[in-house]
Amino acid sequence: MAKVVLVGIHIGKSLAGDYSAALGGAPVRTFTLGGASGAYDEDTGLASRYPTLEGFLRAEVPEWESGDRLVLVAFSAGCWAPRYWMKDAGSRALLGALVLLDGLHSGLSASGGCKLEAIDGVVQFAREANRDPSDKLLVLTHTAIAVPYASTTLCADLLEQTADGRGMHILGFPGTDADAHNAQQREVGPQVLRDLVHPWLNGELSTGLSAAGKVALLAGGAAALYALVRYL
């Protein structure tokens, strides 16, 4: 019988219990390789070592078996690995739910926005999720941190413009500092799993975070400093 397996990329090991509990005790495997994108990208990082999601799973995630329901959560620089893997149709086919926490960004396009070619794999996954929201789910979060490249906000804007639909959720937060960024993995990640991914695994198509989830985010730690600005 297929089971749920959760893989966290650039998610702290100390959070594995919170992430597992958010999905009803699902097995969790986390990977933290460093703080910069080069540890995870297709040039020098994780995605260069394992160019496909299947290769990564077979080598590094013994809990996973073909046919399992896979949930992949990536935070910050860790998003560079699934950003590359999603360019491959076979990798997309293996994945049920993809959660990208404040890490989908790119270089600047000629117009000063996010480069479509950099995130086209995620766009393809979003479109597949929109075609069959019961089969795939995409959750994308972003803060409002200013950076000299295309920020997670700009890339969320582009994703919304090119692939908006019932199979994805975009959650925006106006935090602009390191606490707001780190709260994405500490607080937002588990809440998204509880309110969006867990119901989806049980056949329920959620319309957004629960009222209790919003209150919890606004009441806890660094999350108290910001409020949801998209898809309330």
Image (spheres, grey):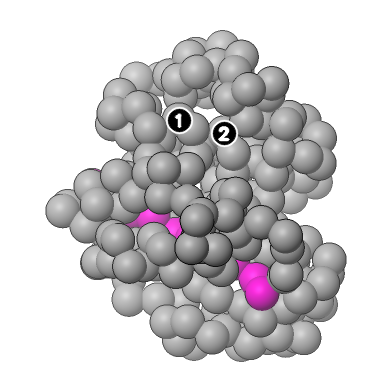
Crowdedness near tag 2: few (<14), some (14–19) or many (≥20) residues, C-alpha within 10 Å: many
Q: Residue at x 72, y 78 (%)?
A: 175
Q: Alpha-carbon neighbours of circle 1 within 10 Å: few (<14), some, or many (≥20)?
A: many
Furthest-left residue in this view: 131
- For mark 2, give the secondary structure: helix
**Residue 143 on the magenta segment:** yes
Q: Position of residue 187 (x, y in %)?
A: 69, 67
In the image, 122 versus 69, the foreground residue is 122
Q: Which amino acid does label 2 sit on?
A: Ala
> Image check: 52 left or right of 200?
right
Measured Cα–Cα span from mark 1 to mark 2 = 6 Å
Please report the residue visible at 73 percent of the width from the left and 63 percent of the height from the top.
147
Q: Where is residue 146 in the image (x, y as percent from the top left)?
A: 73, 70
According to the picture, the residue beneath numbered tag 1 turns out to be 85
Q: Quick one: SS at disc 1?
A: helix
Q: Is residue 193 found inside the magenta-colored segment of the image?
A: no
Q: Residue at x 30, y 61 (%)?
A: 162
Count the marks: how many?
Answer: 2
User: Where, by quadrant of the figure, is residue 130 drawn?
Assistant: bottom left
Most extreme residue toward the front is 110
Mark number, residue 21 = none
In the image, is 224 to the left or to the right of 140?
right
Q: In this view, does 95 lie to the left or right of 205?
A: right
9 lies left or right of 165? right
* Mark 1 touches mark 2? (CB < 8 Å): yes
Q: Which residue is drawn at 24% across and 52% down?
A: 127
Residue at numbered disc 2: 81
x and y percent of residue 103 in the render? Answer: 62, 53
Q: Which amino acid does label 1 sit on?
A: Trp
Region in magenta: 135-144
The secondary structure that dominates the magenta segment is strand
Out of 1 and 88, give the one closest to the viewer: 88
